[in-house]
Image: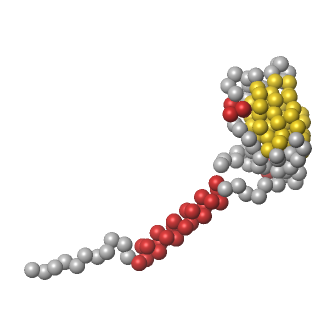
Amino acid sequence: MSRRIQKPFLNKYDIIILAVLTLTGIAITVWIYFPHQSNATHLEVRQNGSVILSLPLDTETEQTITTKNGGTNRFRIQNQSVIMLEADCGDHTCIRTGRISHTGESIVCLPHRLTLQITAKDSPSQDQVPDAVVH
C-alpha cells in the first residue's frame, strides 16, 4: 500500500504574496481614509453658482444667508471648521452633513441653491478642481 504525500496548502511564496497584498491594502486604506495635511483657509459661500461671500476659517463667526425666495440658512465657523446650524428648507440634508474642515469639502442646500465650500488661498481655478471628493 502506497502512501500519498500531501502537499501543503500554501507554500512559502504564497505566504509572501499574501503578506505583500495585505500590507499594500492596509497602506492604501490608511492613505484614503485618514485626513491629509489640510491647507484650508477660506469658506466660499455660493448661491446659484456665484460667490456671494468669502470668509476666513481662522475667525469665529456666525452668519445667516437669506435667499431670493425668502429661505434662510445659518452657519457657524469655529475651530477652523464649518457647520450648518439652521435651515428652513424641507429636507435638512445640509444640517445632517455635519462639520466640514478640509479643502474641497462642502455643505449643499439644494432647495436654496446654496453651497458652502472650503477652499485654500492658493487653490487652483474651478476648471482644475475635481468634480467630487469622496471619503
Tell me, yes or no, if residue 84 can be seen here. Answer: yes
In the drawing, does residue 85 fall left or right of residue 50?
left
- Whole-percent x and y of residue 22? 51, 65
Position above or below: 10 against 67 = below
- Whole-percent x and y of residue 91? 67, 25
- Whole-percent x and y of residue 134? 66, 47
Position above or below: 49 against 34 = above
Query: Is the image coloured rainbow, by chain, by secondary structure, or in one colour?
Result: secondary structure
Q: Quadrant of the N terminus?
A: bottom left
Question: Which residue is more in the foreground, 61 or 56?
Answer: 61
Question: Which residue is more in the foreground, 129 or 88?
Answer: 88
Tell me, yes or no, if residue 48 can be seen here. Answer: no
Q: Residue 8, located in which quarter of the rendered image?
A: bottom left
Looking at the image, the residue that sits furthest to the top is 70
Q: Residue at x 70, y 47 (%)?
A: 133
Looking at the image, the residue that sits furthest to the left is 1
Q: Residue at x 79, y 40 (%)?
A: 82
In the drawing, does residue 98 fall left or right of residue 126?
left
Count of picture labels? 0
Q: Residue at x 69, y 37 (%)?
A: 97
Looking at the image, the residue that sits furthest to the bottom is 2
Q: Residue at x 41, y 78 (%)?
A: 12
Position above or below: 95 against 125 = above
- Whole-percent x and y of residue 85? 77, 31
In the drawing, does residue 15 fall left or right of residue 50?
left
Q: Residue 11, located in which quarter of the rendered image?
A: bottom left
Position above or below: 34 against 59 = below
